[in-house]
Image (spheres, helix red, strand yellow):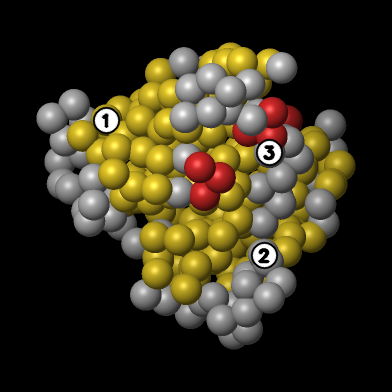
Amino acid sequence: KAGVTQTPRYLIKTRGQQVTLSCSPISGHRSVSWYQQTPGQGLQFLFEYFSETQRNKGNFPGRFSGRQFSNSRSEMNVSTLELGDSALYLCASSLVGDADTQYFGPGTRLTVL
Amino acid sequence: AQSVTQLGSHVSVSEGALVLLRCNYSSSVPPYLFWYVQYPNQGLQLLLKYTSAATLVKGINGFEAEFKKSETSFHLTKPSAHMSDAAEYFCAVRVNTDKLIFGTGTRLQVFP
């Protein structure tokens, strides 16, 4: 069974641009969570989606948004990029009924210049 | 609020030596606790989890952790380190459904 896939793996943008990251969960997983990892702030929860609905949201500004499609694939969008948005963005998926086991993708490395 | 604190951002051991990575938690309710490992340029992999069953939890790659309520600790151990164990390790606590709160991480170096 394929693992969690994230595209693209690397991305370079400039300040003020917007970016969309994609996450395909493991087949059968309906819950998708997003995390931001930076050297200064560590791993921080962004949001979690289940059945196309956002169930939880972290403490990030409104420039960060996401959505989930009917096939459980998820996207996150960051508008008006700032230098501080440079980070590794990780996606994780889990099975309904086994929320304690999250499977992480390899991440998308975003660099904002 | 629930949180975890990892003591020591860097730990160095010799190959074959005991590995001990420390994690203390803060929680007003029985916590669900996790240890994840991250290898360079990769995502996180679940090592083990505590979900209020046995207090001694065995995970993959020979790692185990013991939940001690009296000490609010969930330290990760491995009797004998391998070079392949060099990575960053994160302790985490689950809040709500799928939201994980992570510690700041401990980078483990293993010397030959």
Q: Position of residue B94 (x, y in %)?
A: 34, 50
| Three-letter code for the amino acid on which mark 1 is drawn | Ser
Residues at marks 3 and 1 on the same chain: yes
Whole-angstrom CA distance, mark 3 to mark 2, is 16 Å
Q: Is residue A92 above or below residue B31?
A: below
Q: Which residue is tagged 1?
A: B73
Number of numbered discs on residues? 3
Give residue A90's position: percent from left, percent from top.
63, 50
Residue type (three-letter) at the residue carrying disc 2: Val
Q: Residues within 10 Å of mark 1 (few under 14, many from 20)?
A: many
Q: Are marks 1 and 2 on the same chain?
A: no
Horizontally, residue A25 falls left or right of residue B101, namely right
Output the chain of dot 1: B
Residue bearing the label numbered 3:
B39
Q: Which residue is mark 2?
A: A4
Q: Which mark is residue B36?
A: none
- Compare residues B12 and A75 and report the one nearer the observer: B12
Quarter of the image containing the N terminus of chain A?
A: bottom right
Which residue is rendered at x = 86% and y = 42% of the image?
A12
Nearer-the-camera pick, A72 or A4: A4
The reply to whether discs 3 and 2 touch (Cβ–Cβ < 8 Å) is no
Using the rendered image, report if marks 3 and 2 lie on a common chain. no
**Considering only order in the chain, which callout, 1 or 3, is on the residue closer to the N terminus?**
3
